[in-house]
Amino acid sequence: MKFIDEIVLRIQSGKGGSGCVSFAHNYRNPKGGPDGGNGGNGGSVYFQGNEQINSFFPLMAKKNWMAENGVSGQSQLKTGRNGRDIYIQVPLGTIIKLDNTKKNWHEPQQELVIGEILFSQQACLVAKGGKGGLGNAAFVSSVNRSPRYAQKGLLGERIKLKLELKILADVGLIGLPNVGKSTLINCLTNTKVKTANFPFTTLNPQLGVLEKGKQKTTIADLPGIIEGAAQGKGLGLKFLRHIMRCYLIVYVLDASQSNSFQTLEILQKEIKESRLSESADKPRIIIWNKIDLLSEKQKEELSKKALIWLKQETCFFCSALQKISLETLVQKIFELVEQRKKDGIISLSPIHKIYDFTVPLDWQLSPLKPHCWKLTGSSIDNLIQKYKISEQEELIKKLKKLPLEDYLRQKGVENKDVLIINDQEFFWQYE
């Protein structure tokens, strides 16, 4: 299965069902009065966390999601059925963003985050279904005994979303290509990541579970990076965003290479220069892998040099292939992860603005020509049905009771501009 950590989806919630205009007529009560029922609400769209999924690959086959519309009301005060909600299953660590790829190039590209899925079965509402319209029975009053109008259902929301995945792993392995990260995670977690004795790098993050008695922790083998990755060379830092949620970073170095200390500096420099600079301050372990390729004298020299250069760092000299010193490494990993959790320090994304989708936009304004606009929307249609279009003064009064003036000002509507509603022209005047 391919690993996909970015995807764009088009979401649409269901339209509310229309109310019914009906009057009761039967032999027992020939003038029973209005009995039109209300329309059902449209279905909403949710994203839900599923711990059995680890990428967006299952969503590649379907990128357009539409919830069911509400059913219209019927006579005899029958309320229409609500539309079914949709729950889209996504992996844990999913970040839901408002897609802004269509903005002009000169406009600031500000990412608007709607929510994040961090727990199994956690649901995030992204598109609320339209509310069902009221039937004519709901408008009966002492002065209007036989209303001959009903409301239309409100439209659903249509939105384009970008999903990004940051893997929820406790430990992240970082290193240059061909240093033995895949072999190490295979030995620690019994996974089956592809390995070989020629230079290549893992292209996708690999997850494994490290167990010791009743203790468990997750480890992510991240693709190897090269010098200049912060500027986009090689795979860049595309996959390294996954370490932002890790409690512990493990740098894996090749002990058989004479420049392993320079390699460590390169890795730290690339992370520091990238947008992941906050990850450089996390607890870390430095591992010299492939220690079995060194002689006893070389091991002693490497150990002394590490003690001088990295006095305050936690260092290990091991061999993933020969399983040398892995037990002490596992014990230290559990100690640091548990300490990090007890301290209450968790890897969080930067603070984002929350976009509220629960308030439907009941009107839309379209410019036709200078000082001439067309006003549409569910609320407008409901008013037109309730008040005859010939009653201009009454309709304008009702429009002014809506929170419409600020919206029109933002769009650039001026005093005495023409508003076209249902093919009829009105002059707009601010109070």
Image (spheres, rainbow, N blue to C red):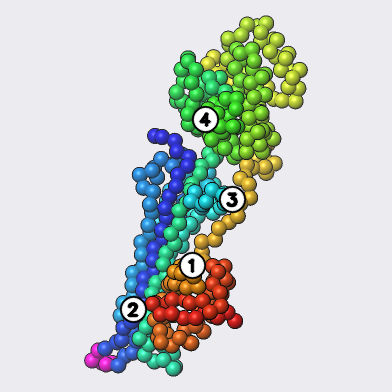
Location of residue 258 with respect to 370 vertically, above or below: above
The answer to which of 200 and 220 lies nearer the viewer is 200
User: Is 267 left or right of 130, judged from the image as shown?
Assistant: right
Main secondary structure along the magenta-highlighted residues: loop
Q: Earlier in the sequence, mark 3 or mark 2?
A: 2
In the image, which disc is placed on residue 235? Answer: 4
Q: Residue furthest left?
A: 27
Query: At label 3, which amino acid type do we have?
Result: Pro
Q: Which element is circle 4 on?
A: loop
Residue denoted by label 1: 361
Which residue is painted at 39% across and 66% down in the image? Answer: 15
Q: Gap between marks 3 and 1, in whole Å?
A: 24 Å
**What distance separates the C-alpha of mark 4 from that of mark 2?**
59 Å
First reached walking from the N terminus: tag 3 or tag 1: 3
Does label 3 or label 4 sit earlier along the sequence?
3
Q: Is residue 81 above or below residue 53?
A: below
* Quarter of the figure with the C terminus: bottom right
Figure check: 187 above or below 170:
above
User: Which of the image's four quarters has the N terminus?
Assistant: top left
Q: CA distance from mark 3 to mark 4?
A: 26 Å
State the separation of the CA atoms marked 2 and 1. Answer: 23 Å
For residue 331: magenta? no
Q: Nearer the viewer, mark 3 or mark 1?
A: 3
The total of numbered circles placed on residues is 4
Q: Residue 384, located in which quarter of the rendered image?
A: bottom left
Residue type at numbered disc 2? Cys
> Circle 2 sits on which residue?
20
Mark 2 or 1 closer to N-term? 2
Q: Nearer the viewer, mark 4 or mark 2?
A: 4
Residue 267 x/y as whole percent: 63, 26
> Which residue range is magenta in the image?
26-30
